[in-house]
Amino acid sequence: MSAHHLSPSVLRAQRATYAAFIASGFGFASWASRIPSVRDALHASPSVLGLVLLAVALGSVVSLPLAGLVVTRFGTARAVAAMAICFAVGLVVIGLGYPYGIPPVVLGLFLMGFGNGTWDVAMNVEGAAVEQGLGRAVMPRFHAGWSVGSVAGALGGAAMVALHVPVNAHLVGAGVLLAVVVPLAVRGFLPASGTAPEPDNDPDAASRNPLRAWLEPRTVLIGVFVLCMAFSEGTGNDWLAVAVIDGYHAAPVAGPLTFAVFLSAMTTGRWFGPQVIARFGRVRAVRSSALLALAGLLLVVLGTALPFAVVGAVLWGLGTALGFPVGMSAAADDPVRAAGRVSVVASIGYTAFLAGPPLVGFLGGHVGVQHALTVTAALLALAIAIGGTIRPLVPEGAAPQPSSR
């Protein structure tokens, strides 16, 4: 479908969805860039800081299972706007409260995590609706937008540090920016996207309760697939730099540089991923990319010199790129049931980001971080095995999408 045949509302929603993803990445990176400053102000040890940061995960764990109900009831636009404001309030609470100790920081991080959980589900539901309106895959590019936003937030944070801008001014400013920009941006979302039909108009509405998605084998399997791919992404984010420095006895600068290679490859894979999906279909594209990630991971684990790790990071990043966004698209194939299913898939998938770092850390204490990454290989193999579960599901009465193979 060419651009001039597309509805203006779909193109407007595409731009608005990019804005939602970019803003989410920007918000998290703004906070992450000031973690060292907040840590120093709190005089927190690494173990205490780790416990404080768990507040974000706790907020998401509370929010994600309920996100389907929220999005179904209020629609994607209102859900993203409300949760962006919740996230922004969290930033402001941290910015104003951290001089007074740990409790305000924990509260602010919980609000950020809570807001992010439903925000993430709602913008993925909207992204899937835009995909269906365009008639082609674009979800990986939305996730690339998140990466772009995170880079912008990180660079902005670095500039704030270099210019000696106080943490409170930076985080409050970022919070106010999100609270203003995101609600304005989501006005471009598709009308009533994500909402369920009224029971009076749809006698089958009761069977579409978002919580019932937890009982659907296909939805749960997609969640497991996303968990495997999220584990690959999360372990790369958290442990690749450490594995390169420790396992290859490389200079300290080699760790973050190899990590930057991984992130760049993943962002590139997400930007060009839609063309791969359009040519080969969703299942073959994702299975091939998971195999590529597995090859890259094994190069990092088994390599004997730093160039092996760098090439491995490229393959690992490229291969990991499509799993999470395509899993979200698969969960949202039926627009009527999209909110509940995306909520379930996100809830299962995000456990990888919670369990992955401590699991690799525990194994790393016994066999070294480089070899502890092998556990990721097992999950990538599982993702390849169950990759068929993300085959497009055509809702009753709907025409197949171009990438439905």
Image (cartoon, rainbow, N blue to C red):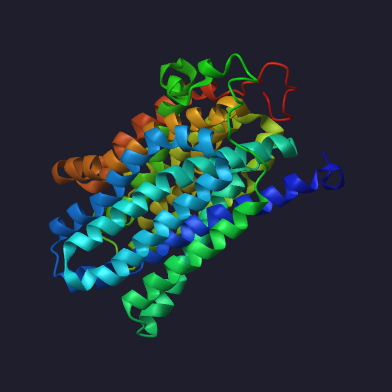
Whether residue 354 appears in this view of the structure is yes
Judged from this view, the residue extending furthest toward the right is 4
Residue 18 is left or right of residue 226, and the answer is right
Please name whichever residue, 383 or 213, is drawn nearer the observer in this view of the structure.
213
- The quarter of the picture where residue 38 lies is bottom left
Judged from this view, the residue extending furthest toward the front is 200
Quadrant the N terminus occupies: top right
Whether residue 248 appears in this view of the structure is no
39 up-or-down from 122: above or below: below
**Residue 272: image location, x then y, percent:** 64, 47
46 up-or-down from 333: above or below: below
67 up-or-down from 218: above or below: below
Q: Residue at x 14, y 56 (%)?
A: 47
Q: Residue at x 41, y 62 (%)?
A: 29
* Count of numbered tags: 0
Please name whichever residue, 199 or 72, is drawn nearer the observer in this view of the structure.
199
Quadrant the C terminus occupies: top right
Q: Residue at x 40, y 56 (%)?
A: 87
Please name whichever residue, 90 or 390, is drawn nearer the observer in this view of the structure.
90
397 up-or-down from 198: above or below: above
**Residue 257: image location, x then y, percent:** 40, 64
**Residue 311: image location, x then y, percent:** 46, 51
Q: Residue at x 31, y 46 (%)?
A: 59
